[in-house]
Image (tube, rainbow, N blue to C red):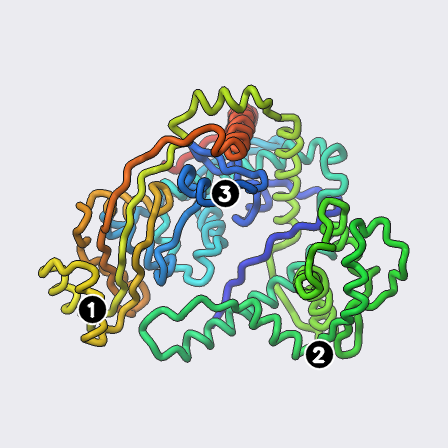
């Protein structure tokens, strides 16, 4: 099986000068930049969410998508396309152009498709790119253009904005060696696990990363120097550390990892902002092992083993990093006062209502059980009687009961469909055959609940973050309007 792997997010950044033109590199889809450049009526919050998540879910369900359990992405998209009446495919060779560096830059449909194929939910099954709607393809295309234009602007003032915010190529490669190897191992473990699963029911949630960690630890003979690691627990700021930087944190087969090798990474956490003294020894050890030690130890082993890797080119990452640095530079002075925040709540109370919700049961089953569920729907069995009949008849299916979804948490067509069903009624039986295995899903709507108002005191922290996000988004919209004019952008995809 040829596995296409999702790259992990990169967090530590240092400067590396480069002169790529944005036209030469089409950015990938895994960047925080999308929080503002993706078209959206409701910009994503990018501040820390320290308010009650249940309030957040009720008020902004569109930012808290909730999965239909035991359905793959492809199967969910099949439900969407069945309800929408089919997929829509793009046509035309050149989908957009803009002018930069004295020449016209063309973005072809093949570039857009290459981008779509890099999306995490598509990588394991490239056929699912056909299920992406025309509207979403247009949004992704606009995102590519915006990112490239931000790069063009950022590279002009790189001396101002890039100091201390970009990986060098060696660090980038090291991070990706680890990411690719771990993801490949997790994919292999998951594949083996599901292959050996004898039940038609979806298996319980499995922490494949933990399994991968244990597998690698044995493979490289990882041994943690517990006493040395716990010394770090009493250091709030690693910059003030005066002990031996040669202190060994762990050993592997024929090597070790010292404080000196991970001091830069430690500075992301031990920087005075949080005290780890409140952690138990066990919690702190687990944190250091996972976040600090594991990656450099495994990379050392992989490099010594001469393992070959391929991942997204450094130049592609560089485009994204420059684009994001410019956007952050542009928005860094945007702020909001308490008075603006309260006024924002008064003027936008419709944004802070607890949204409509639907309470459902749903059942996922194979061809052999379809006739049983057809009879259940025809006989209008209530959920208790249906559950009893399933148990009595030893019917193999996946049952999910009392799942509440707020409006905005589900895929659009499915949402519209479920909210149209009368409470106490079943949906139609929907075919979700996507890869040769015949499967179906049936929904039962237990109740529909209408919107409810909220008060400012309940959600003040949430309002602040939303108001700030909106203000930043408005400034970003103005910026992109100017850039589209400046670079003479033309989009042919409709």
Residue behind mark 3: 52
Q: Which residue is mark 2?
A: 221
Q: Give the secondary structure at mark 1.
A: helix
Q: Is the residue under label 2 in contact with that under label 3 (CB below 8 Å)?
A: no
Q: Is residue 485 in sight in this rendering?
A: no
Q: Which residue is mark 1?
A: 388
Q: Nearer the viewer, mark 3 or mark 2?
A: 3
Q: Quadrant of residue 219?
A: bottom right
Residue that appears at 90% across and 61% down: 244
Residue 315 lies left or right of residue 455; in this view the side is right
Q: Earlier in the sequence, mark 3 or mark 2?
A: 3
Q: Which mark is residue 84?
A: none
Decide: is 350 above or below 231: above
Q: How far apart are the two marked residues, 2 and 1, measured between alpha carbons?
A: 51 Å
Say which label, 3 or 1, has the lower sequence index: 3
Quadrant, the C terminus: top left
Q: Earlier in the sequence, mark 2 or mark 1?
A: 2
Residue at horizontal 80 percent and vertical 74 percent from the top: 255
Asked if disc 3 and disc 1 are in contact, CB closer than 8 Å, the reply is: no
Q: CA distance from mark 3 to mark 2?
A: 42 Å
Question: How far apart are the alpha carbons under marks 3 and 1?
Answer: 37 Å
Q: Nearer the viewer, residue 363 or 27?
A: 363
> Which x, y percent locates residue 142?
47, 37
In the image, taking residue 101 as reference, residue 256 lies left or right, namely: right
| Front-most of residues 6 and 360 | 360
Residue at point 65%, 30% (across, down): 332
Q: Position of residue 290 (x, y in %)?
A: 66, 63
């Amino acid at each position: 099986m040829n596995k296409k792997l999702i790259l992990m997010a990169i967090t530590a950044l240092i400067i590396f000068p480069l002169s790529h033109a944005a036209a030469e590199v089409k950015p990938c889809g895994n960047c925080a930049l999308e929080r503002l450049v993706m078209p959206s009526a409701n910009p994503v919050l990018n501040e820390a969410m320290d308010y009650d998540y249940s309030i957040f879910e009720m008020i902004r369900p569109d930012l808290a998508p909730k999965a239909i359990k035991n359905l793959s992405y492809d199967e969910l998209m099949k439900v969407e396309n069945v309800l929408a009446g089919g997929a829509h495919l793009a046509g035309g060779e050149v989908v957009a152009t803009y002018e930069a560096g004295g020449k016209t830059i063309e973005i072809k449909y093949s570039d857009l498709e290459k981008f779509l194929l890099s999306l995490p939910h598509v990588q394991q099954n490239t056929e699912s790119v056909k299920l992406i709607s025309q509207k979403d393809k247009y949004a992704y295309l606009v995102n590519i253009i915006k990112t490239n234009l931000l790069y063009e602007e950022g590279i002009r003032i790189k001396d101002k904005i890039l100091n201390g915010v970009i990986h060098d190529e060696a660090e980038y490669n090291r991070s990706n060696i680890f990411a690719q190897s771990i993801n490949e191992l997790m994919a292999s473990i998951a594949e083996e696990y599901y292959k050996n699963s004898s039940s038609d029911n979806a298996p319980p949630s499995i922490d494949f990363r933990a399994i991968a960690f244990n597998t690698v630890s044995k493979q490289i003979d990882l041994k943690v120097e517990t006493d040395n690691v716990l010394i770090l627990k009493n250091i709030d700021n690693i910059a003030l550390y005066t002990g031996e930087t040669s202190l060994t944190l762990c050993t592997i087969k024929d090597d070790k990892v010292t404080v000196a090798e991970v001091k830069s990474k430690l500075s992301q956490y031990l920087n005075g902002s949080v005290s780890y003294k409140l952690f138990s020894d066990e919690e702190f050890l687990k944190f250091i092992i996972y976040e600090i030690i594991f990656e450099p130890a495994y990379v050392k082993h992989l490099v010594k083993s001469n393992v070959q890797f391929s991942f997204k080119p450094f130049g592609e990452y560089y485009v994204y990093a420059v684009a994001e640095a410019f956007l952050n530079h542009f928005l860094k002075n945007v702020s909001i006062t308490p008075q603006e925040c309260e006024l924002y709540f008064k003027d936008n109370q419709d944004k802070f209502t607890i949204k409509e919700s639907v309470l459902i049961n749903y059942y996922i089953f194979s061809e052999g059980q379809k006739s049983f569920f057809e009879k259940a729907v025809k006989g209008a069995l209530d959920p208790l009687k249906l559950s009893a009949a399933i148990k009595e008849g030893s019917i193999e299916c996946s049952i999910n009961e009392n799942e509440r979804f707020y409006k905005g948490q589900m895929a659009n067509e499915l949402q519209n469909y479920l909210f149209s069903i009368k409470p106490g009624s079943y949906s139609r039986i929907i075919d979700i055959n996507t890869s040769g295995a015949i499967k179906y899903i049936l929904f039962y709507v237990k109740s529909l609940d209408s919107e409810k108002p909220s008060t400012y005191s309940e959600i003040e922290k949430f309002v602040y973050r939303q108001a700030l996000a909106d203000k930043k988004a408005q400034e970003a919209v103005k910026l992109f309007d100017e850039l589209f004019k400046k670079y003479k952008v033309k989009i042919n995809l409709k």
